[in-house]
Amino acid sequence: MSAVSAAAAFDAERVRADFPILGQQVNGRPLVYLDSAASGQRPLAVLRAVERYETHCHSNVHRGVHALSQAATEAFEGARERARRFLNARSTREIVFVRGTTEAINLVAQSFARPRLGPGDEILITGLEHHANIVPWQMVCAQSGCTLKVAPIDRRGEVELDRLLGLLSARTRLVAVAHVSNALGTIVPVKRIAEAAHSCGALVLLDGAQAVPHTAVDVRSLGCDFYAFSGHKLYGPTGIGVLYGREELLEEMPPWQGGGDMIRTVTFEKSTYNELPWKFEAGTPNISGAVGLAAAMDYLESLGIEAVAAHERRLLALATGELERIPGLEIIGTATHKAAVLSFTLRGCHPHDLGTILDTEGVAIRTGHHCAMPVMSFFDIPATARASFGCYNTEADVHALVAALGKAREVFG
Ligand code: C6P
């Protein structure tokens, strides 16, 4: 189906009905939820899958011979297979359940980078990264003596590809890049970057937190070595996420946390470790979270990720056109290829005040630095207001945003 016909066929009102939380009023107004980049809402299919699991199957995984433990193990490992299919990974051995993107990146930093990198080695990131893809590498640099390099962005919020390619060298050991920027919405040409990184012998980690709700991800076609994302941005539960890693790499990496489930044998003298992926999953995992995440993947694929993306692109274009017409409003992040994120400032009105006024109108947006302080520094602003769209947003939501911004302009003159 073409993007246009997919968008036309997409029935956001029907989708909306799958999300009971959206039916409520906030501050006496119908809720207009435009904060999906921070966390998506959960459809009934996810809520019910979690409830079913908790009501009928819950026990601890991997350790029991009784029926419930087996049911829980089956549900948990079934979710891993679902995640494998979602990413088109080769094997479930490549799917590590973690708390979210942040934990996934820290795992790679501590287990892959820290033991291997030293003085003279470089990690390359870009100027649009979330703190979760900056701070873990700074910690590794302090621990190992390696150096962090940053490829700059331009005024549109696009990575300066030539400058990034120019920073790649035989010293580059790892390139860690957001697939989609959370603060600006920029879609980064990660496949091209991965090819260039590999030709220099560097490995590639992609921060997919903002990409997975908006684009079908195929880790093999992207050519990445690691891919990280969080369930809660994908209409799934909080506290669950996935680190994909190529099996050969994960195999060579030491465990990063010790405890139950990640071992094969333990004596006081020495322990031996479990096989992949459990080697990286110490302690009781978030079982119901994994079940909910699998249901979220089923749900999103039942809508059709391409159809959702086309719908969101349409909303983004509508909102961009409307906001551009508002005097004093500046859109921050005008990349040619953007996902469903619209950051902006309004002259004379701090983004936090703007967010508060919009909230009184029932419109939920996010304000602040979005855990991307270097992006704010680059644009020389303290913060932005950010509206972000999900599968359940409608044109009426865009009009409500525009009307609420009109109210804010009345307040701030
Ligand atoms: N961005 C936002 O409002 P966690 O918190 O681990 O689920 O995800 C961290 C993270 C990593 N990378 C990117 C690109 C992200 O957008 C996020 C989370 C939220 O933009 C919270 S700051």
Image (spheres, helix red, strand yellow):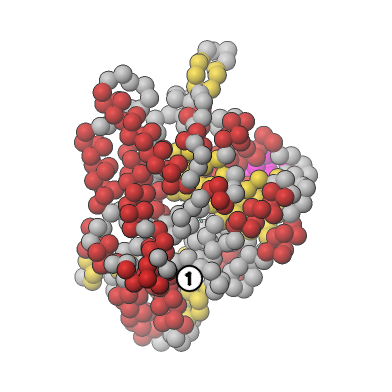
| Picture residue at 60% right of the left edge, 34% below the top | 248
Q: Looking at this view, is 400 or 337 the one in front? A: 337
> Is residue 60 something that shows in the picture?
yes
* Residue 89, above or below 300: above
Q: Amino acid at mark 1?
A: Ser
**Along the horizontal axis of the image, is 282 left or right of 377?**
left
User: How far from the left and from the top, in percent, is residue 218?
Assistant: 51, 50
* Residue 43, above or below 314: above
Magenta region's main secondary structure?
Answer: helix
**Residue 144 part of the magenta-drawn span:** yes
Q: How many marks?
A: 1
Residue wearing tag 1: 343
Please state, as top left, top right, bottom left or bottom right, where the N terminus lies in the image: bottom left
| Picture residue at 63% right of the left edge, 64% below the top | 159
Residue 293 found in image quarter: top left
Q: Looking at this view, is 81 or 111 the one in front? A: 81
**Along the horizontal axis of the image, is 155 left or right of 96?**
right
Residue range in magenta is 138-145
**Residue 5 part of the magenta-drawn span:** no
User: How far from the left and from the top, in percent, is residue 7?
Assistant: 37, 69
Q: Count neighbours of disc 1 (C-alpha within 10 A) and say few if under 14, some if 14 to 19, many if 20 or more.
A: many
Q: Looking at this view, is 199 or 333 the one in front? A: 199
